[in-house]
Image: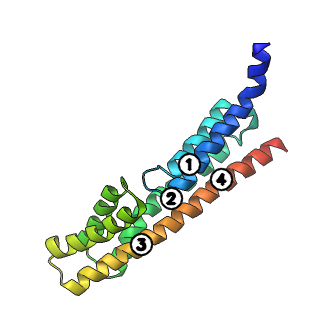
């Protein structure tokens, strides 16, 4: 009797775990304390391991992992490109990245502020740039940060879509 109940509820529990972790991961795209797309990848990989009969298959998990990789690389590259595009130096880009790394342990506004201030402080104190260049570097870091948020969100939604399509394809 107990085995029958477990057999019936196990798939529901795995789907529930997958859904909750995925939703928290999507929220993590805009809430810096949560791991975002990494959590989505973990959820989908766990689903594949725990319930392979209703999973998309390892090929789709590989596709999802590639999308995850784009989100991780895009996260840092967007801020660096934004800073450089607005006239910042390599020091401004490094400062923006460092500020983002510190800010990600706090809230979204602190993450944005850390990115901007990191770029500005590095430009002013390390690269010895003038105030105009320092301000432009900070603005570029802010634009890069916003672009990286859009990239992360697009990747998160792409990961969910790939997973659902893979499940649909496996069921059909």
Residue picked out by circle 3? 144
Image quadrant in which the C terminus is located = top right
Q: Label 3 crowding class (10 Å Cα cut-off): few <14, some 14-19, many 20+? A: many
Q: What coloring was used for the rendering?
A: rainbow
From where the camera sits, is residue 53 visible? yes
**Which of the 4 image quarters holds residue 3?**
top right
Question: Residue 142 appears at what percent x and percent y?
Answer: 38, 73
Local secondary structure at mark 2:
helix
For marks 3 and 4, the one nearer the N-term is 3
Depth check, mark 4 against mark 1: the one in front is: 1
Alpha carbon distance from label 4 to label 2: 13 Å
For residue 9, above or below residue 75: above
Residue positioned 73% across, 31% down in the render: 11
Residue toward you, 126 or 170:
126
Numbered circle sitting on residue 24: 1
The residue indicated by pointer 2 is 71
Q: In which quarter of the image is residue 56?
A: top right
Q: Residue at x 73, y 48 (%)?
A: 166
């Amino acid at each position: 009797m107990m085995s029958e109940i477990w057999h019936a509820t196990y798939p529901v529990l795995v789907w529930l775990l997958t859904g909750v972790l995925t939703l928290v991961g999507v929220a993590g795209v805009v809430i810096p304390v949560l791991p975002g797309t990494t959590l989505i990848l973990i959820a989908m990989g766990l689903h594949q391991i725990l319930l392979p009969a209703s999973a998309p298959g390892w090929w789709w998990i590989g596709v999802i992992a590639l999308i995850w990789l784009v989100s991780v690389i895009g996260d840092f590259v967007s801020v660096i490109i934004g800073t450089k595009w607005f006239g910042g130096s390599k020091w401004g880009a490094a400062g923006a990245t460092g500020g983002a790394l510190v800010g990600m342990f706090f809230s979204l506004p602190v993450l944005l502020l850390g990115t901007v201030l990191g770029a500005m402080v590095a430009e002013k104190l390390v690269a010895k740039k003038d105030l105009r260049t320092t301000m432009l570097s900070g603005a570029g870091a802010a634009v890069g940060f916003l672009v990286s948020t859009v990239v992360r969100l697009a990747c998160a939604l792409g990961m969910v879509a790939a997973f659902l399509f893979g499940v649909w394809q496996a069921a059909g």
